[in-house]
Structure formats: C-alpha cells, structure tokens
Image (cartoon, coloured by chain):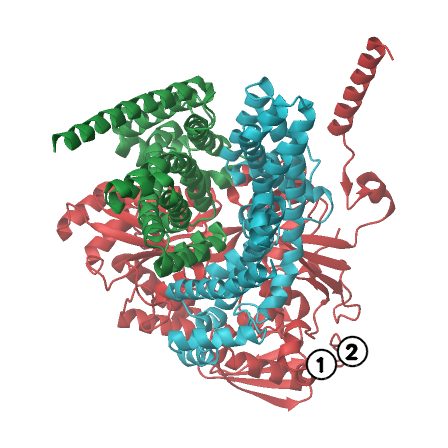
Amino acid sequence: MYKYVIKRILLMIPILLGITLIVFFIMSLTPGDPGRMILGQGATQEAVDKLNDEFGFYDPLPLKFGNYIIDILKGDFGVSYRTQRPVFDDLMVRLPTTLKLVILSLLIGTIIGIPIGILSAVKQYSALDVFSTFFALLIASIPTFWLGFMLIILFSLNLEILPSTGLESWKGYIMPVGIMAIGQAASLIRLTRSSMLEVIRQDYIRTARAKGVYEKIIVFKHSLRNALIPIVTVVGMSFARGLGGTLIIEKVFAIQGVGTFMFDAIGTKDIPVVMAGVIFLAAIFSLCNLIVDLLYGYLDPRIKAQYSK
Amino acid sequence: MNMRKMFANFLIITMLFSVLSGCGGKTENGVPVNEQNAEQKREDVVLGVRGEPLGFDPTQTGDGFSNTVELQLFDGLVQYDENRNIVGNLATDWNISDDGLVYTFDLKEGVKFHDGTELTAEDVKYSLDLAKESPFTSSLNKMESITVLDPYKVEIKLKEPYVIFLEKLCRPDGAGIISKNARESAGAEAFYENPVGTGPYVIKEWERGSKVILERFEDYHWGAAPIKEAVFRFLPEPTTATIAVESGEVDFTDNISAADIPAIDKEKVSIYESPSFHFNYLVLNTNKEPLNNVKVRQAIAHAIDKDSVAISALEGYATVVDSVVRKDAEGYSDSIEYRQYDVDKAKELLKEAGYEDGFKLQILITEGYSNKIAEMVQANLKEINIDVSIQSIESSAFIQDMVDGKHEMGWFAVDNSTTDASQVSTMLETGEMYNLSYYSNTQLDEALHVLNSSINPKERNPKAELVQKIVNDEVPIIPLFWRDDIFLANKQLKNVEELFVQFNVYKLSW
Amino acid sequence: MTNKKNKKNKNKVLKEEKKTSQLKEIWFRLKKNKLAVMGLIILLILILIAIFADLIVDYDNVVVKTNMPERLQPPSGKHWFGTDEFGRDILARIIHGSRVSLSIGVIVVAISVFFGCLLGGIAGYYGGMIDNVIMRIADIFLAIPAILLTITIVAALGIGMTNLLIALVIANIPGYTRLVRAVVLSVKDVEYVEAARAIGLRDGRIIFKHVIANCMAPILVNATMSIAGTILSAAGLSFIGLGIQPPNPEWGAMLSGGRQFLRVAPHMVIFPGIFIIIAVLMINFVGDGLRDALDPKLKD
C-alpha cells in the first residue's frame, strides 16, 4: 500500500512540472512586459528595459524557466509584478475567503443533494424523481452570473434583506454560497441517483433480496456503501475544482478571492502570480486526486484486495 | 392544537412576516437611523471605489486607485479652492519670473508631518527631486532644478515655460510633499506602505483585498477634518457599488454605470454630476491607407452621429463637442464651421476620394464603455459602406498597441486635469508619445508651442483658433465628448460637489 | 471458400439485424422518457430557427442597424422582447444569435471528440511509452481548473471567436482522450478479442470495430452534456469580457452587453438568459435520456 502512495506522490512532480511548463509557455505568448506595465506609459524606454532586465525578462525561455524552477525549490514563488509583494503572501490573503465559500457550499450541497439523490433512485420514476431530475438539470442550465444578478436585484435591492457585496457579515455569505451550493446539490442529485441505480441492479442485491432480507436495510447498507465510492470521488474533485472555479461568483458579488486574483493576474500578465496560482491549484488538485483514489481503494473491497497482494 | 388554531397561527405569522419585511426600519451601520439623527452626527464615511491601491508613495505610483488615497495623505504646494482657482496650500505665496522659467515659493511655517516633525524647504526639495525623475510623474520632468533658498523658501527652475505648471503642483498624488527624514530612514520600500505626509489623513489599516481605513490627523495645519474615519471599500462592479449606496452599506461611490441612473430611487440617494476633464476622441492613424487621404478622414467625421455615440456610451452623461477645445475653455473659437453629422456629405466626400464602394477598417478599443462607442461607430460607418471590425484589447496591452501604432482607427481618452487648449499638444504635436494619429504639421506645432509657453491671451487666442481650424480641416482626430463625472451619495452627506474639483475627503461632512 | 464467404455474409446480416433492433430498442427506451422527448422537439425547433434565421429576420436592417429613438424599450406589441441599448429588436437578435450560440457548442465538441478519439485510441492501442506520455499530458491539462485554462489561452491569443473556440477545444480534449483510452483498454483484454484473433481477424479491425461499438454510448452521452456545458462556458467567458464581442448577437454576448442595463432594462438580460437556459436544459434532457436509454444494465 505504501509503495503505491509514494509512487503516486512522486508522480505528482513531473505532472506539476509539466503544468508549469505549459502555463509558462502560454503566458510567454501574451503581449506586454512587466517593465512597461509597472512604470506605465510615461516611463522612458531605458527605464523600462532596465526593470525588465532586473526581472530577467529578456533571458531566453529555457533559462527563464530553469531559474524559475530553482527558485520554487527554494520556496520562493517570486514577487508580483503589480503589487511588488511576495506572491505567496498575496495568495494567502485571498485563500481563506475562497476556502470558506467552497467548503460551505460543498457541505450544504452534499447534505441536500445526496439524500434527494438516494430517494430518487429508490423511488425511480416517481413524482419526486421526475421533479428532482428536472430541478437538477434546470439548475445546471442556468448561467451563474445571470442567477447571481437576479438574486441581487431581488434580495438586496427590492427586499433589502441581504447585502449585495462582500463578506462583511454572515448575511453576505448567503447568496454566493447559496448559488454555489445549489449547483453542487444539483450535480450530486444526478450523480447519486445514477450511482445508486447502478448498484441497486447488481446481482448480489438481487441475491440478498431473494434471501428475504428486509428491503430497507439492503438499500441503506449495501447500496449506499458502494454508491458512495464514485460520489466520494466527485465530492473530492469538486473541492479541488471549486477552489479555482469561483471566479464568476466573485465577480458578481465583489468578493476578493482566489478567482479574481488569478483573473487579474492573467489579464495584467503578472506572470509570477499566474504561475504560482496555477501550480498551487494543480498541486491541490493532484493531492485531492490521490486522497480520493486512496479512499476509493479503501472503500471498495475488490481494489483493497488487489493492493494487499 | 386543532386545525383551526394552526391555521390562525399560520396566518398571523405570515402577516407579521410581510409587515416586518415591508416596513423594515432602516439602519445604518447597525444603529437605527432615527436614533442616530437624534443623538449624534456621524463621524465616519464609507466610500466605494473601483479598485485597490498598490501603494502610497506619490512618486512611485501612477494608478488612479493609489492616487485617490494619496490625495488624502499629502499636500501640494498649492491647491484648488471650490471654484478651481489656485490658492496656497503648503506655500503661502509665490512669484513667477517674467520668462516663466523660475518659480519661487514661500512656505507656511509650523506645518506638522504625521510623525510630528516640521515641514521645511528640504522636504519640498526632496519630494520634487523625486518627482522630477519619476516615470510616474513625467509631466514634472519639465523641472530642471529645485533649490532651497532658506528653510521656508524654495526656488524651482523649469527647462522651458510650462503654462499649467501650477496646476500640476495642485496634485498631491504626484507633487505631494513627503517627509525626507521618514523616507530616508525607513527606506523607499517601507515608505511605500507606511507613508508620512502632511495631509488631513493617515493610514490606520489596510485590509488587503477588502478596504483601506484612514484616520484623521488631528494636527492637520488647516484644522482637523470633520470626518474622523474614512473607509475606502473596493467594489469593482458598478452595479453592486450602486446598490451598496442605495441600501446604505456604503455612503458614496464614483463607480457608477450611467445606465443605472434611471432606476435609482432619488428619494434614497443623491446623484451629482459635473463635466470632467476626461476628453474622448477617435484617433485616425494617418500612416495607414486609406486614412492617409484627408477626404476619407473628413468623410468619416461627417458620418459619425456624436450624440448617439454619447448616449450609447454614457447615456448622454457627457458634453458632446465639435471642436477639439471645449466651449467653456478659453480660446474656444465659434467662428469656425465645425463638421456636422451629415451622411450625404460623407458619401460625397468618400466618392471624391475614390472610395465610393467603401473599404474595411479596424477600430481598436479596450474594456469599458469604449465598446459601445465602437458599436455605434460601426453602425454609423456601415451607412457609408465602410465595414468596421472591432478589436478589443485588455487595457495595459491596449495602450502599448496604440503607442506602437498598430491601429487603424482607435478610441482614446486623455485627462490632463485641464481644458486649456495647450493640452492638444499631448495628442497632436509631432513626436509626442500619444500622438496616435502620427500626424505632423509644423504650423500646428508652432501654434501649440506658443500655447504651452505663453500666458498672454492676446498671443494665445489666435493660435488656439488656428489649432482648432487645422484639426477641423485635417481631421487627424475626431473629437467626441468630455465625459461627466457622476457621484452617488447618501442624502445626508454634505459638500459632495466639492469632490468634483478634487477627491478630497477633507471637504465632506454630515 | 464459399463456406467462409457464406459465414461472413451470415455474420454480416446477423450483425446488421442486431444493429437495427438495437437501435430500435434504444429509440424505444428514449421515447419513454418524456423529458427527453420534449428536449428533442424543442431542440429541433431551435435548430430550425437557427438554420432559417435569415428568412425570418433581415440581418442588416433589424439585427445590426441602430435605432436610437427606440432604445431600451420594454416588451411591447411592436417589439415582443423589447429593444436593446441601440434600439435593436431583441427577439430578432436572439433568433440570429441562435446560430452562433448553438454552433459553438457543436463545433467545439465535435473537434474535441475527434482529437480525443485520435489521441485516446493511439494511447490505448499502442500502450507503453506513447500511452504514458499522452496520458501524462492529459493529466496535466486536467489538473488546471478549466476556467483558468480557457482564460489563460484567450488572454494569450487575444479575444475573438476563433481563439475562444481553440481555448474551449483544448479544455475538452483531455476528457475525451481519457474516455476513449479507457474503452480501448477494456476492449483489448476482453475474451472475444482473443477468440477473434484465434480465427484470424486482424487486431486493428477487431479493436476498431469493438471500440467504436463500445465508445458510442459514453461518447454520445458525454458529448451531449459537453455541448450544453460549452454553451454555458462560452456565455460565462463573454460575461467576463473574454468571449464573443458585440455586435454579434450571440446569446452570451447579449447577456454581457445588457449587463449594465440590468436595472433599467432587465428584459435585455432575461430573454437571452431564458433561451440559454432552455437550449442547455433541453440538451441536458436529451443527454440524460440517452444515458438511461443506452445503459445496457437497465434492460428491464
């Protein structure tokens, strides 16, 4: 088992390297240079060139990339071109906000989504099933920003019961988290439903039923355990993906999180920030992948058996 | 509980709920409004601004957001009064030599810095020396030298006469006086975040990503500000900023979309508007065919419906202009026949130029309302067979591309804090960085030179007229409008209009 | 000799019969799903509208030409969905916009599926080093949050329709690569491949045929969902200014353009929004229905 874990962790390294390379390459295609960006249009070309030189901007691409990797290994993620502060510090300021949003919405989404999904599967084709499927698909079809603005008009402007921006008070969390949570719930409903349906049809379930075991217990014990496996995967990956996917919600509700941080950086060609952000998010993604795979192995006895060989 | 009782309870609760949400007592900062008015006047103000500062050193920052905060932390040698006349600030008196090259300032005595030390001419020299060399305050590099004549007297020599020099000194976000001692001992980097100036406010706290809190400086040399605490909250979306003011979360914002104005409840908030110094125009790159043909440029000028452009861009919150000099500015000439919106004339001119069948043209724009301007121009020019394609580029790259001359037609705007005719030189003087039309005319250059150096109206006005005539005849640019500044504020906030002159929180009170 | 030929023909006929009855069965199951049926009908209507847009509304005069005196009007008898900030009829723009909005989804997914099949097929079939390299690259791309990947690509290449398509395609390919590879792998090991090999049929043909057969279902279902997702992504990108630019009446661009008029003319945002929701929802219904219909395990 440990061998597998270590192997996986080691595998993360070339993947992260690959990501760094790709993003580095894409960013190098973007027009603009840090010197001009920082000093503005009023600066002389010499001043701009000097600053660019300091940043190593004119170095050939492989050299730039090499230097960057070496710096990372030393723990130095560079300084933002725009704010002149260490990228890591800037990132850490924004991280808690996004974390709160993602974790809360995931929690709420899971609590709502999974039970409804289970019920839908158990009572397939019932009114509840059709309605929740419809509802889940509907939610998945609504553009987030559209919904966000509609809700702001309703709750902040007309009813005046919720603040429209920021996360000053707990009330400020309701709309952004709400929207994200409903989205999570919607996809979990569908996933849980199909996952449960698959399991309910497994042969051994039929066998258990033939033996006369009380149906309710069958559903909850056997089906659930097995259905949980892919759900765990999805929830885990939703967390990882959520961290990088809050951009639109942040824009609508004027929340300063990781999403807008990255977006601004990409737009202003603030390469150190973009690189650090992508590496960070990808590392979390890979980590989640690993944890989820391990859990998967633990939950599914067949796979567990495979690895204890 | 039987059914009837349950139902009755349900009704009561529903009614209570609707009544409560209907007449929810308004609160401000958690304290019910009526209670407040009776007991105490507010001493704090929450301002919603579009973006976050990078730092607070006037000579090391050029972005609008840092500038806005710096205006509260520093003073300039001179300042504007409420009618935009130049009066003394850190300087009590000044003298300008006849040739316009030497400015001598007498400084106010007993002015305290935020750290308690006193202002002397050394600080002024230090600050302006930095400004002279800084790429962020490039207009100030027209200064040649700054000399300390005595602890309260400073002499500034210019390289050449500069008519609007004093106006530049009114801006503490560029020419603000900083403490030499503080910056030298703390170092430039530390000073960047912990500035020491003489202004009415100091930085209390900077919550990155959220807000900057300013606290009043009790020993401010003009007297402590009425507002004790000013919070600048970063609200990038105009829709949310507007709603924030309407719901009372924020007391003031300048980040407004003109489109929202008809929907705003005028009972709840006050709307202020005023023409600004933000001049919008279309650039025609005379290096590119067929824009090198003057008749083509003239045709385009006649094809554009400027009023519609102003409406679609800013809902009409702008002053549309025919001339490159604004009507209320000195030197405006009303004896010139400026080009009007005339589609037939446009078609005729295009035919004369030999382009009756039209051609393809690209217009370069960036984020913001320039999008709507481009769409309008596109629709207008379609009428005369010109097929416009719109290219939108992110703002920092946009400026670079325009400066590099990659555009055919482009939108641009300048804000030189003045309507003076001399500012045309930024746009059209030969060799100027922002001469994005690549237009060169020696007559024009000569006229602009006079406008920049002479302060004699008898000399200037004929030159101003010449400038306007040339621009109207040759059409290297098409003047569109001067944008309005719009502020949205809590009804009880006083003196908001003074912020049009300069964004000084010092002027505000409840 | 003739025996073999006869057998081949018989196999062919059997196979074809099996195919048609399989298809019939799938169609039958799909029809049972009321939501899927509704989805298909409405989608058909939308597609017809998109194809015949020019006949319904004159592009130059109504969709592009400005009409300032009638700007920002709420829905009325003359303008069923109201007018936009340039006075243009919103219904007309929505009708023309359907072309771009719907085709973005289809084009992006079609190209992604094509490359996904290619790469996934190669990876699965050849295995070894090639497989490793392709899969690592796919993993790399999958590890970057999709939104950020698309934003980065668009920021690097520039704003515009082509670049938007490129960005969306790049974001979609890895998923399909993985999918197809998984199918190829599962097919490679199955017993009947061994049996077929024993009879003498070439590896390539066997795998190819079986891969296609097994791929169809998951790809079809996934592709349908992807089309829906792509339409939403394109709209989202337009929202933050990196997608389709005005005056193109693409639905997402209409949302972006109407955003600042949310309070005075919400109809500018509501109607395109509704159409996006309807299109995406119908596609999702069909996709969901397809998934249920194609699931071999749901054979009761």
Rendered location of residue A196, percent (x, y) = 58, 31
The foreground one among B81 and C42 is C42
Q: Nearer the viewer, mark 2 or mark 1?
A: 2
- The chain letter under disc 1 is B
Q: Which residue is drawn at 69% across and 85% down?
A: B185
Image colour assigned to chain A: cyan
Q: Which quadrant of the view contains residue B288?
A: bottom left
User: Along the horizontal axis of the image, is C294 left or right of B52?
Assistant: left
The foreground one among B67 and B486 is B67
Image colour assigned to chain B: red
User: Along the horizontal axis of the image, is A97 left or right of B382?
Assistant: right
**SS state under label 2:** loop
Q: Which residue is drawn at 70% across and 75% down?
A: B196
Q: Which quadrant of the view contains residue A22?
A: bottom left
User: Along the horizontal axis of the image, is C297 left or right of A85?
Assistant: left
Q: In this view, does B287 lie above or below A71?
A: above
Whether residue A66 is visible, yes or no, is yes
CA neighbours of label 1 inside 10 A, class few (<14), some (14 to 19), many (20+): many
Identify the residue position indicated by label 2 in the image: B116
Image colour assigned to chain C: green
Are marks 2 and 1 in one subunit?
A: yes
Identity, as a three-letter code, of the amino acid under mark 1:
Leu
Rendered location of residue A26, percent (x, y) = 40, 62
Spatial CA distance of label 2 from label 1 is 9 Å
Whether residue C66 is visible, yes or no, is no
The number of discs equals 2
Identify the residue position indicated by label 1 in the image: B119
